[in-house]
Image (cartoon, rainbow, N blue to C red):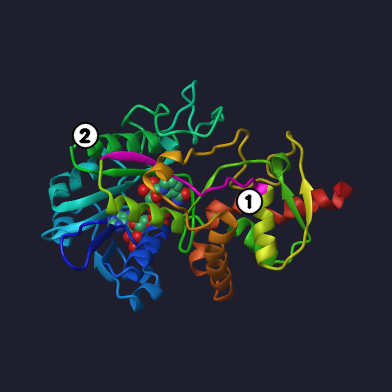
Amino acid sequence: MARYRGPVPEALILGGTGAIGTEVARRLLTDGWKVTVTGRDAAHLDAPLLELGVQFRAVDRADRKAIAAAVGRGVDLLLDCICFTAADAETILPLLPLVASPVMISSKAVYIDTQGRHSNSDEPAFFKRPIREDQPTLPPGGSWPKDSSEGYGRHKVAAERILLESGAPVSVLRPSKVHGRRARPPREWVFVKRALDRRPCVLLARRGRGVDQPSSAANLAALVQLAAETPAPRVLNAADPDAPDALQISRVVAAHLGHRWEEVLLPDGAAPQLGDHPWNRRFPIVLDMSAAELLGYRPVGDYASTVAEELGWLTDLARSGPGLLESQGSYFSRYLDYEAEDRFLGQGAV
Ligand SMILES: NC(=O)c1ccc[n+]([C@@H]2O[C@H](COP(=O)([O-])OP(=O)(O)OC[C@H]3O[C@@H](n4cnc5c(N)ncnc54)[C@H](OP(=O)(O)O)[C@@H]3O)[C@@H](O)[C@H]2O)c1
């Protein structure tokens, strides 16, 4: 049985208006917690959370004083969804004695294979088996920007180490590809849009066999709550119980939207602008979840059941106008090149 500081456990979620924060807030509020989420813009808060009683504070991640004020005299859970660098970790370090269970969201991007390749490398990483938490990681820090493919994982490692070496009971969670309500980017949009546009075919590179394991925000929320209840310094993978390939993902989306399309499974070596999708991996990326399971983690559901939340949200967004999805246009344009597809299909390819 978890012991909290007061009769009502309290959580503070830094960067809490994204997919992970939204789902953790929803889970904890439903379970009777008091939850405050931070962000820069209250308009980004998921409206249903307000009905559940969430509190919002405008706090910039670089503002030490504002974060300290939000922690106040202490919280049971401090979930940091926007800890990307050593400097970010150092910002919260002095506050850790006031927190019963600090949880930092890291990433599977920290892992390297035997050749030093990682999930964002130009050369595809090859992991022989599902990746465990003791897999070697990138070296910490360096001069690459935190949002570059080489810098992202390195800066995450630097942040992880500072928190893990603090002596505080910090849980570092390493998700894979996050899906859920308010996901950024909501990757399934590549198939949702096609289904809403009633496209007659879906083209899939590498015959749709690419695997890059999903991590539902709902499953992450279950793991965050478990970490809150059992504080200890640790690193845990955080992924869905299954690892569907892109063909299976496309079928889940099409079935959800009641659409049928012809599957055009392109061979390796097809033109790169055809059939590309966010799970287009040469070698599968799958996380070993046994450490979390040993701790008592039970996922809320598999990919097909948990992704329904994001699919419903995306469908509603599409019906209410471009809005949020338009701001993600640059991410999606390479996956939604209908003209190139139509030219290919018009050549009698199917
Ligand atoms: N997405 C993935 O597939 C994936 C995979 C692995 C790991 N992760 C990790 O997951 C975390 C992101 O979680 P998420 O996807 O739930 O979040 P998200 O959608 O990226 O949202 C980030 C949240 O932080 C706020 N925010 C961003 N920059 C801020 C700043 N400078 N100061 C204050 N607030 C700021 C945003 O709201 P405002 O814009 O209103 O400020 C929003 O609430 C990151 O640590 C990332 O490394 C993500």
- The residue lying toward the viewer, choosing from 26 and 22, is 26
Above or below for 301 versus 283: below
Q: Earlier in the sequence, mark 1 or mark 2?
A: 2
Label 2, on which residue?
Answer: 165
Q: CA distance from mark 1 to mark 2?
A: 41 Å
Badge 1: residue crowd in 10 Å (few <14, some 14–19, many ≥20):
some
Above or below for 97 versus 30: above
Q: Is residue 280 left or right of residue 221?
A: right
Residue 81 in view:
no
Q: Quadrant of residue 283?
A: top right
Q: Is 111 within the magenta?
A: no
Q: Is 235 within the magenta?
A: yes
Above or below for 140 versus 46: above
Task: Give percent across and percent down for residue 318.
Answer: 58, 70
Magenta residues? 233-246
Residue 309 in view:
yes
Residue projecting furthest to the front: 1
Q: Amino acid at mark 1?
A: Tyr
Q: Amino acid at mark 2?
A: Glu
Q: Is residue 302 left or right of residue 137?
A: right
Label 1, on which residue?
Answer: 335
Q: How many marks?
A: 2
Task: Give percent across and percent down for residue 81.
Answer: 33, 52
Residue at x 27% of width, y 56% of height: 1
Q: Quadrant of residue 159?
A: top left
